Each structure stands twice: as structure tokens, then as C-alpha cells.
Image (cartoon, grey):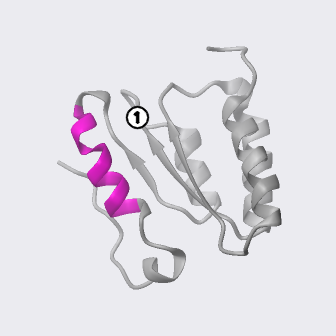
Amino acid sequence: EPGAAPAVAAALGRFLCYARRGDATARAVVVKLAPDDPAQYHATMNCLFAAKRRKVLVDACSVAPSPSPLMRQAAHLAGGIFAHVPPDRLDRLLATALASFAADAACRERLPPPRAPP
């Protein structure tokens, strides 16, 4: 809902606080079900810059009619993978998640990147 609290940024911020106490191989997967809200852009980008500085891998999946530019940028900035699953193809969500997000950073260097489904 436009104008609401920046939920994506709040979730990423909370995760980064938790990951700081954890090990150095922290990873996050953001699954976004709604269209982008411009009000969330700055707060989300600040969290992503913090994730990049801490070497936290952030993957993003957009489940919306059109791919989320914010989530694409999030994955690119934080060294993760972006995937888009249209709402009418939710049957591909699990396969996309397993194929795209299961491998850690070291394995991803040796694996080919996932291709977009036809």
C-alpha cells in the first residue's frame, strides 16, 4: 500500500542486525509480492548498501505482473540473483527458488546462472 511503512527496508534492516551477530556467511532472500512503492526506495537502498559493506548476499524474487526494478537493483547491488515469477505461474516458484537461490556464493562461481523460463 503506497505511503505505508517501508516493510522491505524494515525487514532487511532487522535481518542485518541479526546477521551482524551471526557468522560471516549471512544470506537473505527477499520475496516481494507487491509492486514497488517509491516511498520505500531510499530506505531499501540504505539497507542494501549496508548489506554490501558487510558482504551479505541478497537474492530477490519478484512475484508480480511485471518484474520489480527495485528488487532487480537490490540483487545486483548486493551480489545476489534476481528472479521474476509472474502470478499466473506460481507453479514455478519453488523450482525457481531451488534453482536460483539454493547455492551459496562459492558454488555460484562454478554454476551457470539460471535462465529465465519460457
> Residue 38: which quarter of the image?
top right
Residue 110 position in % (x across, y down)? 39, 85
Which sits in the foreground, 94 or 68? Answer: 94
Q: Left of 50 or right of it: where is 35?
A: left
Figure disc tally: 1
State the residue at coordinates (31%, 33%): 86
Q: Is residue 5 above or below residue 76?
A: above
Magenta stretch encompasses residue 66: no
Q: Left of 91 or right of it: where is 101?
A: right
Label 1: few (<14), some (14–19) or many (≥20) C-alpha neighbours in 10 Å:
many
State the residue at coordinates (22%, 51%): 117
Residue 14 position in % (x across, y down)? 77, 45
Residue 64 position in % (x across, y down)? 40, 29
> Residue 23: which quarter of the image?
bottom right
Q: Which residues are magenta?
A: 89-100
The secondary structure type at the circle numbered 1 is loop
Magenta stretch encompasses residue 92: yes
Residue placed under numbered mark 1 in the picture:
63
State the residue at coordinates (54%, 62%): 80
Q: Is residue 54 above or below residue 82?
A: below
State the residue at coordinates (75%, 22%): 5
Q: Left of 24 or right of it: where is 106?
A: left
Q: Quadrant of the N terminus?
A: top right
Q: Could you tell me the amino acid type at mark 1?
A: Val
Residue 21 position in % (x across, y down)? 82, 65
Q: Left of 6 or right of it: where is 66?
A: left
The dominant secondary structure in magenta is helix
